[in-house]
Image: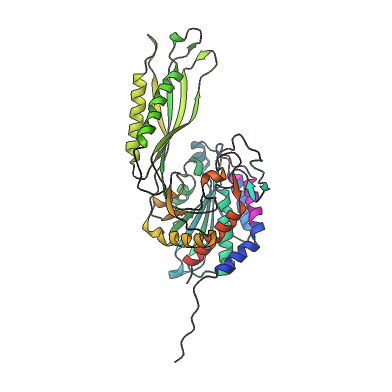
Amino acid sequence: MTTPATTDPTPDYAALDAWIDAHFDEQVRFLQTLVRVPTDTPPGDNARHAEITAAALEAMGWAVERHPVPAEQVQAAGLASITNLIVRRPYGAGERARPVIALNAHGDVVPPGEGWTHDPYGAEIVDGKLYGRAAAVSKSDFATYTFAVRALEAVARPRRGAVELHFTYDEEMGGELGPGWLLAQGLTQPDLLLAAGFTYQVVTAHNGCLQLEVTVEGEMAHAAIPDTGTDALQGAVHILQALYRLNADYLQVRSGVEGITHPYLNVGRIDGGTHTNVVPGKVVFRLDRRMIPEEDPAEVEAQLRRVIAEAAADFAPPRGGRALRVQVRRTLLAHAMRPLPGAQPLVQALQRHAQAVLGEAIPAVGTPLYTDVRLYVARGIPGVIYGAGPRTVRESNAKRADEHLVLEDLRRATRVVARALADLLAG
């Protein structure tokens, strides 16, 4: 009896790596093109970047779907323009059409800020590092995912499942007009998600985030006779002190998720006053409260509103002066991401290949950041965070001056992602 011939289903990882190496200069040029187009959010006028990205992908031979978000929705969110992109790469049909694995990275970024020694939109390469806003988070993973998929198709040639690239433009403002909008419109329903990374770690959970805008109103007065008004800045300081005291209590609230420690509160912006010689009549500040996965967002918000109201009531205006008036408005609520069981095959493939490529064991952990991944997970789509990045967020200066990406980390991450996709779509 003749034994039927069999084909080894194990992907050729060395060939994948070699393809990535052979095309690495092209990959770096692609990333430079993306970094050189500003996408500061606010103001969030990012449709141009999406068009340039789409044109570059089309030059590689891919069809690109452009999905502009209606202008009224964008403007209501305080932004100018958003066009989200989807690239669909199907490999199988019928029973072999799944799994569909989505790869998501965001192109919007926080403004550069001060202190740069390199042009934040120059994409300069110095000593093996590419400098620029979003070089590390997360235009880098536009390049990681694009070239990992190109390597997959050139070498592994999968015959089942599909890959979708989701390049979106609303992460900095919460993601509801990025992945949230694509999902709500029924434009995609993947089985697994891999989203832009920022460290060597494979991230399976993250914090939630609540942001509030607090408006404190007193009564303006001439600085020469301050007792004739109610100083809104002094009132805001009184409230801020009460809020900051909560951070001491938060140290005692511990998360059971490795990589996540405790909740914390930060006030990131304060505006107010009209002139140096005028007692401020109004001050507005914005606070950011990071919530560990175990916390209930409704309870967190209720506590913050209670602390603000009690502190405002406790503030004593001048004799006969107007009491403080305080308004609190929620500007963002991002739920925490929890791991879903269906993510394990992707987690294990990423860990296995990251260890092989990086030469060290790579943990699967949580992170105190919050991301768009929660929007997929909330719809039952298992999500994992992994892409180009250093060992820690701090090393890359992400969201700081001189943000940069070590180019070898881009090469390594692309290898890991290509290998993991080949495993999941083999057979």
Where residue 270 sits: x, y (%)? 49, 27
Q: Nearer the viewer, residue 129 or 296?
A: 129
Q: Is residue 233 visible?
A: yes
Residue found farthest to the front: 360
Q: Residue at x 52, y 69 (%)?
A: 158
Q: From the viewer's perspective, tell me whether residue 3 is left or right of residue 13.
A: left
Quadrant including the N terminus: bottom left
Residue range of the region highlighted in magenta in the rendering:
27-48
Q: Is 176 contained in the magenta span?
A: no
Q: From the viewer's perspective, tell me whether residue 294 is left or right of residue 403.
A: left
Q: Residue at x 40, y 29 (%)?
A: 244
Q: From the viewer's perspective, tell me whether residue 42 is left or right of residue 296.
A: right
Q: Nearer the viewer, residue 313 or 411?
A: 411
Where residue 23 sits: x, y (%)? 65, 61
Residue found farthest to the bottom: 1
Tell me how the rendering is colored.
Answer: rainbow
Q: Is residue 63 visible?
A: no
Q: Nearer the viewer, residue 329 or 112?
A: 112
Where residue 103 sits: x, y (%)? 50, 56
